Image (spheres, rainbow, N blue to C red):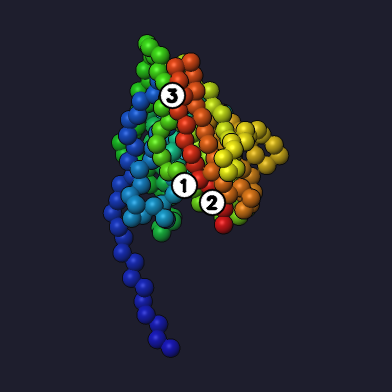
Amino acid sequence: MCIFPVLVIRVKYEIRTYDDFVVKGNTAVLKCYVPSSVQDFVPVISWETDEGFTIQRSSSDSKYKIAADGSLIIEKADLSDGKKKYRCICKDEMDNESVTSIPWGQLIVTEPTTLQVPRIRSGSREHHYKIGAAVELYCIAQGYPVPNYMWFKQEGTRLLPLSSNRRLQVLRSTILIHKASKIDTATYVCVANNSAGEDRIHLQLVIS
């Protein structure tokens, strides 16, 4: 039997974080940009601030969360959040080394001056998870006054309101499903509204 050597070619790449804007009191999102050529083996493992504070994926902090795609979610952003700088830290699973984003990203927090109709940030509208996985669906809106969120599960032409139970958590702009099963495959609708108006998004969840 012939054994052929495996040639591993190291690819040079950079992880990047950019500044983003948020209206005070809203939920902010900072993205960690990993080149598509290495995304499969360079996951985001944490974020840190220039003050030395680290946010882990397993963090139970109500202020900060790391989304499934590696983005940093900052709830109820205030002016103090705009005084920090942030960067993401990834793990290169090919050589087991940490890779830090450049440059630091900053959150630019603006004071609202007029009514703003909620606008939901665009993102992936189709989400695939394996049976038994922990599912995260996000619906991040900007508006003034700060939007309220309502979640629904679509069944035919009906929208059934979602509320928390033993397996499902509804947390304002997020729903979490523990130990997903095929019955969770559905279209989920998020509605963000305030006194100025509303916006909505349909998210397709597929469990297989």
Horizontal and vertical percent position of residue 108:
35, 23
Residue at coordinates 40% horizontally, 58% vertically from top-left? 95
Residue at coordinates 58% horizontally, 43% vertically from top-left? 156
Residue that carries the numbered disc 2 in the rendered image = 206
Point out the tag, 2 or 1, that comes first from the N-terminus: 1
Q: Say what amino acid the circle numbered 1 marks.
A: Glu
Residue 44 lies in what quarter of the image?
top left
Point out the tag, 3 or 1, that comes first from the N-terminus: 3
Residue that carries the numbered disc 3 in the rendered image = 118
> Is residue 137 depicted above or below 93 in this figure?
above
Label 3 packing within 10 angstroms: few (<14), some (14-19), many (20+):
many
Report the quarter where the N terminus lies.
bottom left
Along the line of sight, which residue is nearer the eye, 10 or 74? 74
Dot 3 falls on a residue whose secondary structure is strand
Label 1 packing within 10 angstroms: few (<14), some (14-19), many (20+):
few
Horizontal and vertical percent position of residue 60:
59, 34
The residue positioned farthest toward the front in the image shown:
157
State the separation of the CA atoms marked 2 and 3.
Answer: 27 Å
Residue that carries the numbered disc 1 in the rendered image = 126
Report the quarter where the C terminus lies.
bottom right
Dot 2 falls on a residue whose secondary structure is strand
Horizontal and vertical percent position of residue 96:
44, 55
Dot 1 falls on a residue whose secondary structure is strand
Q: Say what amino acid the circle numbered 3 marks.
A: Pro
Callout 2–callout 1 Cβ contact below 8 Å: yes
Horizontal and vertical percent position of residue 194:
49, 19
Q: Say what amino acid the circle numbered 2 marks.
A: Val
Callout 3–callout 1 Cβ contact below 8 Å: no
